[in-house]
Image (cartoon, coloured by chain):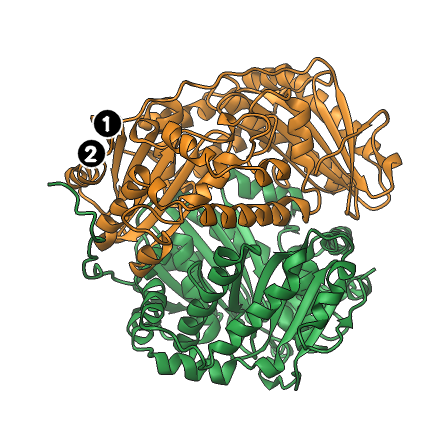
Amino acid sequence: MPVDRSQLPSVGPDPPFAFPGIVHHTLPNGLRVRVVEHRSVPVITFVLQVAGGSGSDAASQEGLAAVVADMVDEGTGSLSAIEVSDALARIGAEYDLDVGADATTFALTTLTRFADRGASLLSSLVTAPSMRESDFERVRQLRVDRLRQLKDLAPAVAERAFLNLLYGTHPYGHLAIGSEDALRRLQLSDVVAMHRARYQPASATLVVTGSLDAAELIAVASRAFDSWPPASPGDTGDSGGRPDSLTVDRPSPRLAVMPREAAAQSELRIGHLSARRDTPDYPALLVMNAILGGQFVSRVNLKLREEKGYTYGARTGFDWHKGSSPFALQASVHTAATADAIRDSLAEIAAMRGSRPPTHDELALAKASLTRGYPRNFETAQQVARAVAQLALYGLPDSYFAEFIPKANTVTAEDVVSAASRYLDPSRLTTLVVGDQAAIGESLASLDLGPPEVLPVPV
Amino acid sequence: MTRLELPYSKRTLPNGLDVIVHEDHHVPVVAVNVWYHVGSKNERPGRTGFAHLFEHLMFEGSEHHNSGFFPPLQHAGALLNGSTNTDRTNYWEVVPTSALDLALWMESDRMGFLLPALTRERFETQRDVVLNERRQNYENRPYGFALMALLAALYPPDHPYHWMTIGAAEDIRQMEFEDVQEFFRTYYHPANASLVLAGDIDTERAFDLATRYFGDLPAGVKPAAVRAEARLTREHRLVLEDRVELPRLYMAWHSPAMFAPGDAEMDLVGDLLGNGKTSRLYKSLVYEQRIAVDVSGYQSSRELGGFFLLVATAAPGRTLVELASEIDRTIQELVDHGPTAAEMERAEAQAEAHFLYRLQTVGGFGGKSDQLNAYNVLRGNPGYFPEDLARYQSATPETVRAAAAAHLRFDRRAVLSIVPRGQQQLALAGSEAVSVS
């Protein structure tokens, strides 16, 4: 039968998919364990999440949480830093860590036949790192050097300056890597103290996913982590600051420029502080963002890239935090197109609040792309483990994955406009340009955002 | 040992299209993956960047769906993308099983009927997008021109690896809409393509669908294979100024082509010298002597010939001369004595694990569907997976040592110093200033 090319083939009903069954267990020391059987390949993933991240660094200690996390694989017991890496390599392990604003996450993936070795290694690293002075000095110096290298990278320069513009001195206002001054002031004793206070079984969650049954996964976790001592009465188990209490923000729009001489492109950030992860409007905001700039077929990308050719890509998004999260549009645009790209971006953000409500097609496409492709996020053991860790981080129920799809599908055009009206505010938007000021200065004046505030280039 | 395999079935349609099917029913999705055996190696000097720009045009619509490629597939919950390198161009979608017909309809429509939908306006917009891609990923990025300078030194001007896939900005600006047609007719047809369907699908049904959507497309003429050789006869020292805080040293050598004898060994040499904290160069440069802030090393395997690269960034106050001398000492030690038994044991464990990790996803870049196509297009054998792994398992300390000795010669390499602006004196002695833009 020849292909009918007069119309696209119809798509059948969504295939059924069973989201991972999560089994809970708590070790005697208080460590919360979540396990999921995942049998596609003989691989096992451990994700250990410790409450508290860069968002609870003290004001004079920006970067401390990241240094603590970095020190974890710098040696344990009789093993040096190099020997730790060698032990990981000999079981073919992939090890990485992420210092987020609200949590610090360690992940180790290995072959299932090395499950016990992997678990016991991770346990030793996280619970009993050596914390030697010479390793600390090297790690700190490498971070100072890295910070210096980030000045070369326009997106990193923009990210750092933008967070600072939005949050000021609030702990969310710095990158995890912190600042050079703070890093230089850090002492090993600060690192040891934070590790002792923060890395406690009662404030951590361990997720194990892999090709064993749930009882065996729990047994692997217990053998490795049972010996982690619970907090002594003197330790607070404190996960740091109170990001929920955040109130800082701007009352009016502003334009800031960080000069970057002869830059081929301008790096743009446009946004403001917005919702928290626990907002009941979360599904509506995801749908709204998908329409505005959260995917390839979004208003912002279609306008700036596909219609105007100003950029290789433009997107918007919420960087979800427990406290107020930033909403931002980001793009690298051709220097000559800077002011036009900003004008178009501001117009798209404003229009989302009602002057151009989502069309039927836009709404359907945004919802479909969020929901119909959802099962593919659960293909690997590591994807599943990280997804389950997110539930723990934000206090979401195990039924969350299964409930997300129907919830997102009930979002209406009115919900989207309403969410946009409440969480996007053109009158408060901060626009940051990292670019060639000499080339773009004049055109920026045409934006009616007032004279730009020129930010000092970090030295 | 875990049993490692990647089972498949293959048939070739009468029009020359290879179709390969792999079943994996863990998640209700199917990966559709198409390789066209064309890349920047098929371009000519003065016309560089064309294969990649063409890839962008494949997303702009085709005769029977004359608008963007993304919306219908995103409506169905698909994830999709494409990429171009020197040797091939690939396109993929991961779709819910219920949307497989749609994905095949769309892929076959752009394989058979792209040109009627292509307008000059779409072409010109994508040319601007690509120029911005170039600015974002090369011009406005620190050390962004390093590979361009090194490839230009490794390969003579008429060798198709002399330029990078992104192409020269000037060439991109001068591209003609008219050239698109010839390029499409030459390279984009069933006889120069390979289709993999991997995932939640029955093998027979997969072949039926492939035949249904692609079987009627006219066969084309398989393009002749590109042949080219290159060698260095001395050490080339180059220097490039850039907007960077710290100077960085690059060393590049010619090395075996993908899957050729010595390719797997050089991959192991890359791990051994410069991949991760256990590598010899990390240990000496970053951990013990602290003269570098980072170091990396890898074998870049390509169809016509590979290159091997070592990269190290100087710690503040340290010099590229110090790095070069320590790197040379480390290479010489490997060439003289080979890897240790412990290093080989570790390499073998890592090889097994990495081959296993590669079996975790059906789609996307590097997923099972992409691997089957790589083996089929570049080896003519989608079942090459176990042989590929065996190349690593059969490497011995002596074969690794011999590969390093044969390929990492000090008198046959390109050495590039990238230094902060106005500080050419930080380059290795005798370096020649190169201009790249």
Q: Position of residue B430 (x, y in %)?
A: 85, 24
Q: Position of residue A308 (x, y in %)?
A: 53, 58
Q: Quadrant of the N terminus of chain A?
A: top left
Q: CA distance from mark 1 to mark 2?
A: 7 Å
Q: Mark 1, chain letter?
A: B
Look at 45% across and 81% down and name the residue there. Answer: A355
Q: In the image shown, does A448 or B259 lie closer to the viewer?
A: A448
- Tell me the residue that label 2 is attached to: B215
Chain of the residue under the numbered disc 2 shown in the image: B
Q: How many marks?
A: 2
What residue lies at 59% left-to-right and 15% top-to-bottom? Answer: B402
Q: Residue at x 37, y 61 (%)?
A: A35
* For marks 1 and 2 on the same chain, the one whose residue lies earlier in the sequence: 1
In the image, what residue type sits under mark 1?
Asn
| Percent position of residue B254, x then y | 61, 21
Relative vertical location of residue A332 with respect to residue B295 in this rendering, above or below: below
Q: Secondary structure at mark 2?
A: loop
Residue B414 shows up from this direction: yes
Three-letter code for the amino acid on which mark 2 is drawn: Gly
Q: Nearer the viewer, residue A439 or A215?
A: A439
Residue sitting at x 38%, y 68%: A25
| Chain B drawing hue | orange
The answer to whether dots 1 and 2 both sit on one chain is yes
Quadrant of the rendered structure where residue B247 is? top right
With B298 as the anchor, is A110 left or right in this view?
left
* Percent x, y of residue A433: 69, 65
Q: Colour of chain A?
A: green
Question: Which numbered circle lies on residue B15?
Answer: 1
Residue B247 left/right relative to B34? right
